[in-house]
Image (cartoon, helix red, strand yellow):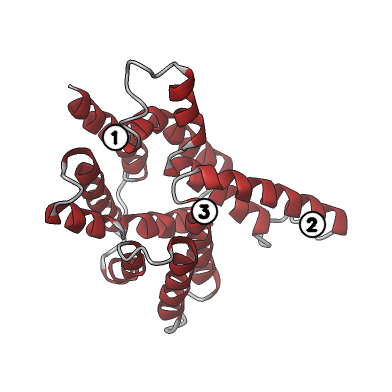
Amino acid sequence: MLKLFAIITMFIDHFAVAFLNPESTEFLLCRCLGRVSMPIFAYMLASGYIHTRNYNKYLMRMLIMAIAAQVPFSMLAFPTYLTFENLFTMQGLQVLFFNLNIGFTFCIALIFLKMLDIRNRNYNTSKGYVVVQFIVGLILLNYSFMCDYGPYCIFIVFIFFLWQLAFKNNKYAPYVCTGLIFIFTLVFYHWSLIQWLAPLAIIPIMYIPHTRYKYDKWIFYVFYPLHLLILVLFMQF
């Protein structure tokens, strides 16, 4: 149910971008509602990392989804600069390769979690390894600025990772998470009042059942690129 809620709010947000007047009240309301979807997906990503039986397959599924979604994402986010007509021009390729969708952000977040996870049996604490990790981390963090939500999303994933791994039974943890997300929202988005609604995602996370079904792990991987493609096709034609 929580994943379905996140998908619905994400779709409403993207529908507004595709079809509503940016100056309308309906557009504003839809965009406000959509602010909670990313933190919920970040929470589920952290949970998925903790419980996955195969990290490599988890990362590969996310990467395949991100690649499949990149063209429709770019066409939805930058309709003025990218259309079917100029898809393979220099301008089109620049938009495609330097404005990446959130699937790539989640891939980077998964790599960070793997690097920082001390539960890993192969975790190496030697100085040389730590230096290499630090350099790789800086490179990935810098690269994430080209991805949707960028480092902001990565920090939120890590906050939820710590909550679920070490403080799940602490009654104050949800409030601390909310406060930390709000602080990072101020740091990255300053006075963007709409984005201030992101910390409210803690409410559905706490109160909507995290019901799991047999094939529910595939829902997001399929829905994310598919709904972007459908929205773009309706926009173009």
Dot 3: element: helix
Which tag, 3 or 2, sits closer to the chain's start? 3
Q: Position of residue 83 (x, y in %)?
A: 32, 23
Distance of mark 3 from mark 2, alpha carbons? 22 Å
Q: Position of residue 235 (x, y in %)?
A: 20, 29
The residue labelled by disc 2 is 130
Crowd class of label 3 (few under 14; some 14 to 19; many from 20; radius 10 Å)? some
For the C terminus, the quadrant is top left
Type of residue at label 3?
Tyr
Type of residue at label 1?
Leu
Type of residue at label 2?
Val
Q: Which residue appears at 31% of the width and 41% of the height?
A: 219
Q: In the depicted view, which residue is nearer to us: 105 or 65?
A: 105
Horizontal placement of 38 versus 13: left or right? right
Q: Is residue 92 above or below residue 70?
A: above
Which of the 4 image quarters holds residue 25? bottom left
Q: Is residue 122 visible?
A: no
Q: Is residue 222 above or below residue 129?
A: above
Q: Which residue appears at 41% of the width and 56% of the height?
A: 44
- Checking the image for residue 228, the label placed there is 1
Which tag, 1 or 2, sits closer to the chain's start? 2
